[in-house]
Amino acid sequence: MTVPASGTTTAPNSTTAGLSLLDVTLVHGDGDTAVTALDHVTLRVAPGEFVAVVGPSGSGKSSLLAVAGGLLRPTSGTVSVAGTELTSLTDKRRTEARRRHIGFVFQQSNLLSSLTVREQLLLPSHIDGSLDAAARARADELVEAVGLPHRAGSRPHQLSGGERQRAGLARALMSSPAVLLVDEPTSALDRARSAEAVRLIAEQTHEHGTATVMVTHDTAIMDAADRVYEMVDGRLS
Amino acid sequence: MFLALRDLRFARGRFTLMGAVVALIAVLGVLLSGLASGLADAGISGLRALPVSHMAFDAKATGEQFSRSIVEAEDWEAWSEAPGVERAEPFGNTLVNARVTAGAEKGEQVDLAVFGMAPDSFMAPAPTEGRPLADGGGGVVITREIADLGVRIGDVLTADRSEVRLEVVGLVDEPVSYGHIGVVYADLDTWRHLHHGLPGELPGAAGEQATAVALALEPDADVTAVEKATGTRADTKEETFDASPGYAAESSTMALIKGFLYAISALVIGAFFTVWTVQRKAEIALLKALGAPTRYVLRDALAQVLVVLVAATAAGTAVGLALGSAMTGKAPFSLSASAVATSAGLLVGLGAAGAAVAVRRITAVDPLTALGATR
């Protein structure tokens, strides 16, 4: 496990791989009602690096994920994922970049209710038009890696919170994303399961060389991260 | 259809209910179209069977032409000499109450829709049994509707009041009727006696009249001059259908019912898929956040709509056809493949349109909502 010395800067070549946010500002609304969700945020995450962002709710953590994941276009600044500058892409290309390079692990895992665990994993491949034997093999592999082989044929309502979270993580890893964005992974879990979920994320990050950003307000799970940032009022420190 | 089919299986209770509604509408659609074409057959199959393109009526008869209009010999003579007219011959139409006075069903009352024409006319029937029409003697050719009452070739029918005697000489074994009454073909002289209710010699002009001039016109024939000269008006064969008693009212009623049925089904299907789509909003946002283009989600949803509609319509149509074939013969009911196909096609088409409006809201779902309410 490598822990960089400090600060908001890493090696200069990290813009070509991993995740990089440069001087990103995001303003919701305009005029008197304008709210600055992100205030000149710069963040670089190298492949294989696990970064945690903590902060109270409303501090802009989710906005950070939305911008990093190409769900929102920042008001100013640039976002690059695996060497592709998201901020200059059309909506269609951004959707495609999201599919190819970004893995999301959502709060409460967000699985599709009609699909089995295995099918949840196969869905991104189907969307991509690449549902083949290799994809099926990879899905089986990932189901194994997150410890759910006995649950591969179960639907979300048959799973526990922890199992759902693991299934969500496996799905996010399906496309071998360059960037993994994790939103409050432990909000539905007890302490022991939280630690286990985060350990699993850290493990996958280091093993697959993923640039991982996890936002959470749960300070107890930060230990697994390589670097920890705190977010207050849209500023990262 | 990766997700669509799995959603169908997972939410099968809801989709079965919706499918049942569509299937019942399809059953009703088949029965209604069978009834509509049955009623149409009963009303105008006699007119439809005539090899005419137009009928020229007295211009003063603008409604109920077949009972109001009278044309004279000089009218059909003028018509037959006009340019663009291939055939122009007198046609008589009248409804008569009669009874069987000789034959197995002696004493039975029968209603007759009498079509009068010259025996050598282009309209003259070709009997499947017996002899064709001939001048004089009061011979008539009956159709299946009358034969179903037990009237046979050789029987004698006598018109009420006028006591005009009709001998059945031939049978056209097809269901041919007019105004829900079986058609009987007669020569013009016999028809005139029946029409005027007079046996024996006909007075003066009555012997030279008919209801209308039956026409076979060349396409695009300009007949305004001859219409003006004779004081007649040429209606197309389809226009004459409305002159058949009750036909316009029946067909517009059926059209109204069918129209409402399809409108209601489109709305019900639209409402169902609106609720379904709204319910699925979180999952749609998730799909988009995972990188599914809106097109992918829309295609999936529309495929699901079509699976439900086509399966339910097919099932309902099958049930409707089974019920319909049990009804055929017992009611004015006739099933035609094209009417059933049109009915099923309209149900699927309009249902899909209703659902398409509903699933369109997929485009408005913001993938951002997958990240949760907090920003």
Image (tube, coloured by chain):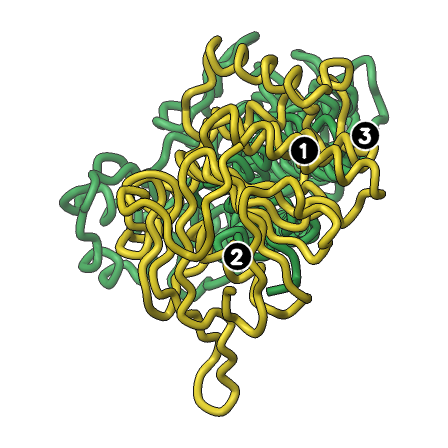
Chain colours: A yellow, B green
Residue A16 image position (x, y, % from top left): 28, 41
Q: Residues within 10 Å of mark 3 (few under 14, many from 20)?
A: some
In the drawing, what numbered circle is on residue A159? Answer: 3
Residue drawn at (57%, 52%), measured in percent from left and top?
A228
Of tags 1 and 3, the one toward the viewer is 1
Which residue in the protein does label 2 denote?
Answer: B366
Q: CA distance from mark 1 to mark 3?
A: 20 Å
Q: Is residue B239 above or below residue A200?
A: below
Amino acid at the residue labelled 2: Asp
Of tags 3 and 2, the one toward the viewer is 3
Residue drawn at (59%, 65%), measured in percent from left and top?
B375
For the residue pair A130 and A27, the one nearer the viewer reads as A27
Circle 3 sits in a helix, a strand or a loop, which is it?
Answer: loop
Of pointers 1 and 3, the one earlier in the residue sequence: 3
Of tags 1 and 2, the one toward the viewer is 1
For the residue pair A126 and B69, the one nearer the viewer reads as A126
Q: CA distance from mark 3 to mark 2?
A: 27 Å
Residue A199 image position (x, y, % from top left): 67, 33
Using the image, name the chain to which the residue with label 3 belongs.
A
